[in-house]
Amino acid sequence: MDPLYRRLGELIGGHVQAVEQQIVQHLTQLMQSIGWPGVVLIMALESANIPIPSELTMPLAGWLLVQARGGTALQAIWQGGLYGAVGCTIGSVASYWLGAWGGRPLLERYGRYLFLRQRDLEQAERWFARWGDWAAFVSRLLPIVRTFISFPAGVARMRFGTFTVYSFVGSYIWCAGLAWGGYVFAHDWAARDHAAVRSAHCPGDRRRRRVVRPPTQGVDPGSIGSGP
């Protein structure tokens, strides 16, 4: 691989990792401050077209709000599923009615403020064409698509009761699985958190741990460290 492209990949990867660490820090502060209502709030925003990854939110909740407090895996499943699904449903309902009220003209005029693009709507419409009303359920089990499916459902005037039930059930399964994963792999979250803190406070740690090579052949060992 060309060194330029390799370096570019490293820079982009480092930037993404830094952004991810910032998100995790903010989520951690929120959950430690207000607990499960914070999860409801974040998941509502995520389902209302705000790209906050549930793949970070829910595993973090399984760790901080269940495992770290001495809870069980079953608690991670039902609490994570319930609170996550409630938040998802709130945000989804808001996005649904926004789509039902404004339709395509709203997307074309204000889509960039709603973090929605024309191709997001087109992708969602293809889902509805393929799956029908089940698209509201299936999409809740898929990354990215789940964030943007509600607005097109409103544009298509999907039956509101069916949309709400499918959204809740699909979101429950998704959130419960992620929260359970966070509970099971809590030690990995702790290790990442420790590494992030260490990196923030000891940026020169890697440089200090350089391997000291022995003096090359022909150099007088007694001359090393001696003055001029």
Image: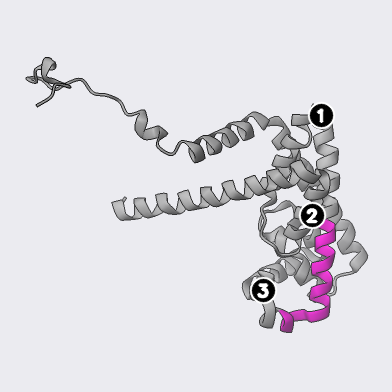
Vertical placement of residue 81 versus 164, above or below: above
* Position in image of residue 24 (x %, y %): 63, 46
The three-letter amino acid code for the residue at tag 2 is: Leu
Residue sitting at x 43%, y 39%: 203
Q: Considering only vertical position in the picture, is 6 above or below 215? A: below
Quarter placement of the C terminus: top left
Q: Which mark is residue 113?
A: 3
Q: Quadrant of residue 62?
A: top right
Number of marks in picture: 3
Q: Which residues are magenta?
A: 88-106
Would residue 137 be visible to someone looking at this image? yes
Residue 2 visible here: no
Residue 103 included in the magenta stretch of the image:
yes
Residue 41, disc: 2
Farthest right residue in view: 161
Residue in the picture at 66% in, 46% down: 56
Q: Secondary structure at mark 3?
A: helix
Question: Magenta part mainly helix, strand or loop?
Answer: helix
Q: Are marks 1 and 3 in contact (CB under 8 Å)?
A: no
Q: Position of residue 214 (x, y in %)?
A: 20, 20
Please name the amino acid that badge 3 sits on. Answer: Tyr
Q: Is residue 71 toward the left or the right of residue 22 in the image?
A: right
Check contact, mark 2 vs mark 1: CB within 8 A. no
Mark closer to the chain start, 1 or 3:
1
Q: Decide which of 102, 155 is in the foreground and name it.
A: 102
Q: Residue at x 75, y 54 (%)?
A: 42
In this view, the residue farthest toward the top is 222
Q: Residue 71 got which mark?
A: 1
